[in-house]
Image (cartoon, rainbow, N blue to C red):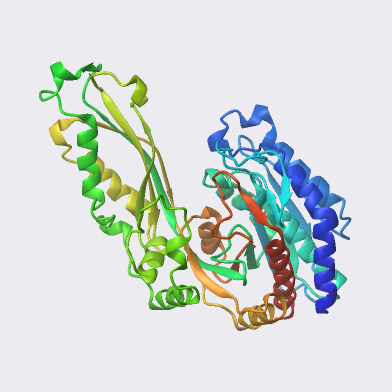
């Protein structure tokens, strides 16, 4: 393809057409179903899907077919089917994935910013869902347009945008079964729900962690009692829960003790992570706004990155049964509930890990207290297949012509459940998991923002990758 035309097409489309529509998408409070139990009646998820459908329809791509698919009781997906260019009909299907559901708004946005108000400032588009992951469908479509404008080639391409990724993609297995015949033989997967450690290069994610999520309640009383009367006789539900967690996690180091949650780290991945650490020594220690005087878990860059990509971790992300401190009386509470969120190594078996976790939490419970487990969720991670020669070649070209710096590969500490599913369904496919996210994009927290220049460079890169795949 002709480089100048690709770049001009991408930049013109982004400035004149993508940004206005993406800003409109930011305004839609399309909370993921886990955060909006009444999502059917609120209609925001449907509105987001229709908003992007209408924009893609306006592109008037020859032969493109658009459909909102919605199975009974499930969130909608947008399916855009674009035929192959002449000569690339035998290259299988390219599946370009993104999602349109969003995390909750969360308080504490900076002055002048709001989760549902798009603001462009200093090359950034602020607003919930701009970076995670509303831009992805626009980038995929624009990349395909740039290929056509520059005389390139692409295989049959299907853009699939779901509406429940932030809830763990519970509906996607059903959709993949429902759509399997229509998708056909997927030979390349492009996922734009990721990013890397800076905005200086294209980052490829070569692994994603899996996850476990479960609510654990320890109950010791039928009703709360005066702490002066009951303490020392009735065991503390919080102390029992602490002891149960100690079976799972070393409180000194954060190491997870359960065998099925740990794996051996492949030598190739360790070497790639070392290369990532060497790119910017010390950068990983300053990626997050640590409170004054707080130190990272360890002082070694490689170990920190391994912790974040190939080792299991536990975060307590919710609690109930506690009054606010201002309202706390002298009461021995009847129960304590904690929400435990584990990140699993990419190759760990999530089902086996959940089984071992449940056993640890419910066997030989101190004082024979009642333990209740609720809302379990187990998702496998993903480890990328070996890179094909054609992909290695085009990634070098992208580094030279788009970024002026070699691409980098790294693991990602988060989860994209769909990737694990696709890895099972399409074991022979190549995977490009990338995106415009950086370490300070503020996804899931206040002041989420999209790096507009990086989004355009990623779009250019996808155009080159689509063309190289069609010619491979």
Q: Specify whether 432 is left or right of 88.
A: left
Task: Residue 293 in the image: state x and y as whole percent.
Answer: 36, 53
Quadrant for the C terminus, please: bottom right
Task: Residue 82 in the image: state x and y as whole percent.
Answer: 79, 61
Residue 141 occupies quadrant: bottom right
Please determine whether, in this image, residue 183 is positioned above or below residue 395: above
Can residue 430 be seen in the rendering of this structure? no
> Furthest-left residue in view?
233
Residue 5 occupies quadrant: bottom right
Residue found 88% across the figure and 60% down from its top: 62
Q: Specify whether 340 is left or right of 229.
A: right
Please determine whether, in this image, residue 467 is positioned above or below residue 317: below
Of 183 and 305, which appears nearest the observer?
305
Can residue 235 be seen in the rendering of this structure? yes
Q: Specify whether 58 is left or right of 377.
A: right
Residue found 72% across the figure and 46% down from its top: 119
Quadrant for the N terminus, please: bottom right
Please determine whether, in this image, residue 330 is positioned above or below residue 21: above
> Number of callouts in the render?
0
Residue 86 occupies quadrant: bottom right
Task: Residue 99 in the image: state x and y as whole percent.
Answer: 64, 50
Residue found 56% across the figure and 78% down from its top: 387
Residue found 60% across the figure and 51% down from its top: 177
Of 351 and 324, which appears nearest the observer?
324
Task: Residue 310 in the image: state x and y as whole percent.
Answer: 39, 64
């Amino acid at each position: 393809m002709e480089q100048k035309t690709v770049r001009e097409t991408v930049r013109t489309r982004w400035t004149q057409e993508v940004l206005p529509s993406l800003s409109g998408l930011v305004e839609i409070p399309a909370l993921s179903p886990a955060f909006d139990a009444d999502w059917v009646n609120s209609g925001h998820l449907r509105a987001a899907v229709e908003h992007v459908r209408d924009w893609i329809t306006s592109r008037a791509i020859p032969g493109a077919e658009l459909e909102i698919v919605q199975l009974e009781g499930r969130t909608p997906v947008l399916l855009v089917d674009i035929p192959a260019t002449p000569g690339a009909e035998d290259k299988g299907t390219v599946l370009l994935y993104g999602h349109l559901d969003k995390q909750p708004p969360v308080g504490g946005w900076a002055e002048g910013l709001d989760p549902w108000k798009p603001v462009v400032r200093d090359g950034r588009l602020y607003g919930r869902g701009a970076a995670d992951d509303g831009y992805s469908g626009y980038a995929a479509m624009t990349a395909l347009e740039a290929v056509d404008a520059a005389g390139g080639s692409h295989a049959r391409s299907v853009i699939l945008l779901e509406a429940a990724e932030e809830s763990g993609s519970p509906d996607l297995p059903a959709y993949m079964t429902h759509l399997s015949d229509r998708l056909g033989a997927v030979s390349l997967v492009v996922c734009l729900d990721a990013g890397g450690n800076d905005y200086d290069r294209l980052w490829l994610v070569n692994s994603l962690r899996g996850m476990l999520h479960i609510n654990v309640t320890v109950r010791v009383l039928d009703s709360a009692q005066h702490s002066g009367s009951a303490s020392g006789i009735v065991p503390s539900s919080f102390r029992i829960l602490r002891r149960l967690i100690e079976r799972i996690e070393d409180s000194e180091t954060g190491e997870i003790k359960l065998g099925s949650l740990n794996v051996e780290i492949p030598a190739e991945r360790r070497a790639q992570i070392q290369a990532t650490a060497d790119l910017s020594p010390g950068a990983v220690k300053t990626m997050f706004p640590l409170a004054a005087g707080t130190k990272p878990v360890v002082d070694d860059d490689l170990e920190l990155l391994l912790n974040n990509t190939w080792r299991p971790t536990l975060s307590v992300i919710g609690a109930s049964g506690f009054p606010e401190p201002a309202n706390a009386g002298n009461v021995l509470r009847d129960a304590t509930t904690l929400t435990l969120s584990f990140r699993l190594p990419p190759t760990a078996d999530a089902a086996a890990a959940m089984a071992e976790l449940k056993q640890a939490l419910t066997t030989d419970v101190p004082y024979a207290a009642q333990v209740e487990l609720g809302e379990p969720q187990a998702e496998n991670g993903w480890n990328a297949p070996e890179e094909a020669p054609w992909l290695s070649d085009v990634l070098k070209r992208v580094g030279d012509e788009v970024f002026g710096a070699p691409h980098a590969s790294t693991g990602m500490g988060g989860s994209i459940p769909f990737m694990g599913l696709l890895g099972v369904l399409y074991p022979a496919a190549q995977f490009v998991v990338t995106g415009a996210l950086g370490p300070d994009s503020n996804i899931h927290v206040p002041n989420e923002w999209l790096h507009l220049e990086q989004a355009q460079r990623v779009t250019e890169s996808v155009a080159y990758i689509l063309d190289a795949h069609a010619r491979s």
